[in-house]
Image: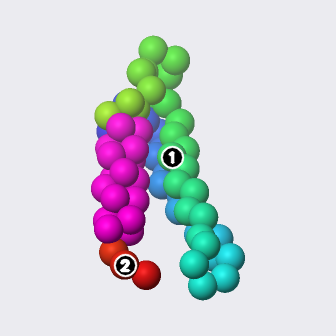
Amino acid sequence: MEAYKTIRFIVDVEINGNQDSLVTRTIVYEKKNVVVPDPHSLINLGINLNKDIERHHLLVPN
């Protein structure tokens, strides 16, 4: 994390009625210099978190 000037996690929820919702998660980061790699581990963590949340919601009866 020291390699980045800033890292922000943005979550936007758009509710369309009782059943339909859209969640957008965004990771915004600024590297300290150009040789710093992209934060793939954080991106993969976010992807896995999204999969777990989706799996949970698909199993819960409405």
Q: Which residues are magenta?
A: 42-59
Instruction: Identify which residue, 4 or 50, lies in the foreground.
Output: 50
Q: Residue furthest right?
A: 16
Q: Residue furthest front?
A: 61
Q: Position of residue 35 (x, y in %)?
A: 45, 15
Q: Which residue is mark 1?
A: 27
Q: Is residue 34 left or right of residue 41?
A: right
**C-alpha distance separating marks 1 and 2:** 31 Å
Instruction: Identify which residue, 47 or 62, lies in the foreground.
Output: 62
Residue depicted at x 51% and y 46%: 27
Instruction: Identify which residue, 17 or 6, lies in the foreground.
Output: 17
Predominant secondary structure in magenta? helix
Which residue type carries mark 2?
A: Pro
Q: Position of residue 58 (x, y in %)?
A: 38, 65
Residue 6 inside the magenta-drawn segment: no
Which residue type carries mark 1?
A: Ile
Local crowd size for mark 1, using a 10 Å CA cut-off: few (<14), some (14–19), many (≥20):
few
Q: Is residue 5 left or right of residue 58?
A: right
- Where 13 sits versus 52, above or below? below
**Mark toward the start of the polypeptide (1 vs 2):** 1
Q: Is residue 49 left or right of residue 19?
A: left
Q: Position of residue 53 (x, y in %)?
A: 36, 61
Residue 54 inside the magenta-drawn segment: yes
Q: Secondary structure at mark 1?
A: strand
Between marks 1 and 2 in the image, the one whose residue lies nearer the viewer = 2
Q: Secondary structure at mark 2?
A: loop
Which coloring applies here? rainbow
Find out whether the residues at labels 1 and 2 contact each other: C-beta distance under 8 Å: no
Q: Position of residue 37 (x, y in %)?
A: 42, 21
Q: Which residue is mark 2?
A: 61
